[in-house]
């Protein structure tokens, strides 16, 4: 079992796709996915954890095939009725999805930790891999925009990422304890590699990295850290990453990703369309693998997982 | 407008049927329905008000035509998924119904009173009549059974009324203030009659009557109080009323209803099948009208409403 464990750090959609690729090529007991919880929020009295849910639903084979969030075969009776009743409907919650939020909220009120609730949900959904929240303590991402500070979901869903971004705040981060199982793995001989999934670096990965002691633990870990670039050919596959990079005056290229993770990363996987950026990444002292990173099919997800694991083997012991 | 207002006191199904009858034969601004809230409870973190909802859905023309609770054309995606997730499913909540509970719970948490929330819901549902909770303060009915004390919904839904009943407790009743609009009407010249709907006397009407000062206000009111018997031919149309009467060693007859309400009631409407009980009711000094009280059709509801209003006119000024 030594050097076999993979620890993936993930946000929502893009991260979940690679997590599924890894889940399909690794024995279930060798994969742990840690999810960003900075996007979590309370809505209609329910605790909603978008990234945990996207990863759970994806690994359970229940995610919506196109929209990138929520469940397949979803219905919208509750929302439709809430609209008739003149309730708040800016955040769309499907009927089946609501069962998750109702149960999670109830179990949290009963005193269970978010980890324990996630474990229950994963068990009920038949997920054999380990899915962990980055912390059992509450962290809330806010976005500093040209229009002032916005809670993450207000920026992301209600304002559709329209206001220009100036920076980010992870409220509660200074007292949030990284999930102990993540810290244990990072210090363990069992760990083969840490994979930073192709999620938004500012909104999905940075909250995880900002947990007290986590960057230090990543640097101290004997396992290599590999980031998969969410930028392909000057754009992001999904979400506001490219728009945010422009607003922060950063080039929209895998080089920016490499520099962003420079202090913790040993290797970067970038898309074949970005091959010309590989030498500059090498110059930072970071290994690079060039492959197709656009995950349209299940095969794409598996192939990218193989590329990541192959870079991990190459880097094993070289850190 | 003098002597035109009707104040109906109601539980769930049976009460809602007569409330609908009254709503169909009276101008909307002349009907106020006060609902029992002793059955209200928290479930899955949501505030659920079964009697208010049944009356609202019924007056909105949205109630389920047969089952006596919930909405017509309901779907069950949330419950089905909650079952898969191994959540609590002993209390059935339809998808459309859940929108009511989510919105109500959110508005209550925001500090609105149950009255204000009910007003919002009635407005959104297009209900022109006034529907009021008996109180904005929390009252919780418990049932003393042979198996100990059970919270109302545990007795009613989870245990399906199986344990034999010894008595009832309305927790919080001593500090619950009757809805001020109900008190205002009772003291007003505008009031034509109070109608005690054919609901369970112990579980649906007694919590209203037990509100501090309410019996006194009913007795002091110049308007007659008329009760419609929920007992027909030795049985109850719906629910556990007959079973409870047996368990309390009380005859299952309209006479028991008349005696139960003796201190406040001026007239009783009883079913034509119970005509033989009318003389004994007269002997109590209570007026009685014999008619069909079984409300199968809309016509039945309207006809019973007319009978009640007719008895009210007869008794007007004679109190």
Image (cartoon, coloured by chain):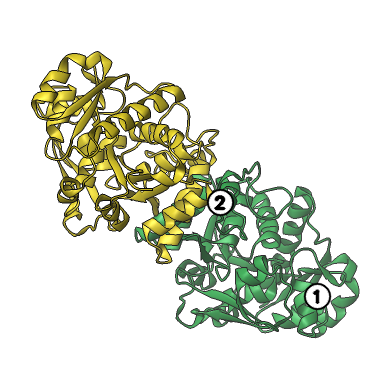
Chain colours: A yellow, B green
Regarding mark 2 in the picture, which secondary structure is present there? helix
Front one among A315 and B53: A315
For the residues labelled 2 and 1, say whether their Cβ atoms are less than 8 Å apart.
Answer: no
Residue A87 as seen in the image, left or right of residue A284: right
Front one among A20 and A268: A268
The mark that comes first in sequence, 2 or 1, is: 2
Residue at horizontal 67 percent and vertical 76 percent from the top = B202
Residue A191 x, y percent position in the rendering: 30, 46
Q: Quadrant of the C terminus of chain B?
A: bottom right
Looking at the image, residue A290 lies above or below residue A67: above
Q: Which residue is mark 2?
A: B82
Residue at horizontal 56 percent and vertical 65 percent from the top = B34
Residue A169 as seen in the image, left or right of residue A269: left
Disc 2: which chain? B
Disc 1: which chain? B
Q: Which residue is mark 1?
A: B254
Can residue A28 be seen in this snapshot?
yes
Residue B229 as seen in the image, left or right of residue A35: right
Residue at horizontal 51 percent and vertical 36 percent from the top = A61
């Amino acid at each position: 079992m030594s050097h076999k464990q993979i620890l993936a750090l993930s946000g929502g959609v893009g991260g979940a796709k690679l997590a599924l690729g890894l889940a399909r090529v690794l024995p279930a007991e060798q994969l742990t996915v840690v999810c960003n919880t900075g996007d979590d929020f309370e809505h209609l009295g329910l605790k909603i954890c978008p990234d945990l849910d996207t990863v759970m639903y994806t690994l359970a084979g229940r995610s919506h095939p196109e929209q990138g969030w929520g469940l397949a075969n979803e219905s919208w009776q509750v929302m439709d009725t809430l609209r008739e009743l003149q309730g708040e409907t800016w955040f769309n919650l499907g009927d089946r999805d609501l069962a998750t939020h109702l149960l999670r909220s109830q179990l949290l009120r009963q005193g269970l930790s978010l980890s324990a609730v996630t474990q229950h949900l994963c068990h009920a959904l038949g997920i054999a891999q380990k899915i962990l929240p980055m912390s059992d303590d509450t962290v809330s991402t806010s976005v500093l925009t040209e229009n002032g500070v916005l809670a993450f979901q207000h920026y992301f869903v209600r304002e559709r990422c329209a206001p220009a971004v100036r920076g980010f705040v992870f409220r509660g981060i200074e007292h949030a304890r990284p999930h102990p199982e993540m810290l244990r793995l990072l210090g363990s001989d069992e760990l083969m590699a840490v994979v930073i999934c192709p999620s938004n670096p500012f909104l999905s990965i940075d909250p995880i990295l900002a947990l007290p002691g986590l960057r230090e633990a990543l640097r101290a870990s004997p396992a290599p850290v590999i980031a998969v670039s969410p930028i392909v050919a000057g754009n992001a596959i999904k979400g506001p990453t490219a728009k945010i990079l422009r607003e922060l005056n950063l080039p929209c290229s895998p080089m920016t990703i490499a520099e962003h993770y420079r202090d913790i990363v040993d290797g970067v996987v970038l898309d074949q369309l970005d091959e010309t950026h590989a030498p500059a990444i090498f110059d930072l002292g970071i290994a690079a693998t060039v492959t197709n990173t656009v995950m349209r099919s299940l095969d794409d997800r598996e192939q990218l997982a193989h590329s990541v694991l192959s870079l991990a083997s190459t880097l094993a012991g070289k850190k």
